[in-house]
Image (tube, coloured by chain):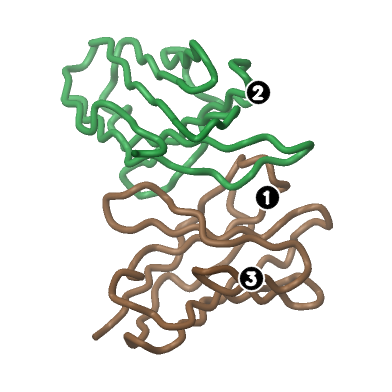
Amino acid sequence: DTAVSQTPKYLVTQMGNDKSIKCEQNLGHDTMYWYKQDSKKFLKIMFSYNNKELIINETVPNRFSPKSPDKAHLNLHINSLELGDSAVYFCASSLRQGSRDTEAFFGQGTRLTVV
Amino acid sequence: DAKTTQPPSMDCAEGRAANLPCNHSTISGNEYVYWYRQIHSQGPQYIIHGLKNNETNEMASLIITEDRKSSTLILPHATLRDTAVYYCIVSQGNNRLAFGKGNQVVVIP
């Protein structure tokens, strides 16, 4: 009954490869996010989708492409992986209520290691 | 950039109340104070949020000063499972959350 689930939990890959991380939420939320936590433990928002539409796109390299096939899923595809992409990636979701969002529910994270 | 200041770490005794301070002197009138925590190797977990008034839920209480420049998160009876990094965040409520370094809280038996 995991509310926000990410797969895989761990991902080790070589530089230059293309990889995807999947996220699904079963909370009935309409807004989903990707956050990145770097080696210094800073957690920063990357993208936000509301009803499958991109609403937040921070200054993220265009090698990162989020895709939302429906409101319950937000996948993250990364092309040409670099060493600096190594981090923990968290998916989150919330519900839009008027001009505000309810609190965010986070997944357990995907630890990406690029070698 | 985080708009809040928290102590980098603190210890508290199991069973006692834990008071976690946060300064947010540049908070805007339409910004809320949110608290999240991150237990080791897990995703962040929402605790509580408030605008002006004090708030309480099953996890914690949030005390916001009248000038809204600072707040205190109170864990009424700390347990070992409350050991985590606690983040105080100001946000307009759009979940564009700017996590700072947080406060590493260790609950000691």
- Say which mark, if any, is on residue B23: 3
Q: Is residue A48 left or right of residue A75?
A: right
CA–CA distance between discs 1 and 3? 14 Å
Residue closer to the observer: A15 or A7: A7
Q: Is residue B40 above or below residue B22?
A: above
Q: Chain of mark 1?
A: B
Name the residue tied to disc 2. A55
Element at badge 2? strand
- The x, y position of residue A115, in whole percent, is 15, 25
Residue closer to the observer: A34 or A38: A34
Amino acid residing under circle 3? Asn
Q: Which chain is green?
A: A
- Say which mark, if any, is on residue B91: 1
Badge 1 local density, few (<14 within 10 Å), some, or many (20+)? Answer: many
Element at badge 1? strand
- Give a yes or no on whether discs 2 and 3 share a subunit: no
Element at badge 3? strand
Q: Residue at x 57, y 66 (%)?
A: B5
Which color is chain B depicted in?
A: brown
CA–CA distance between discs 2 and 3? 29 Å
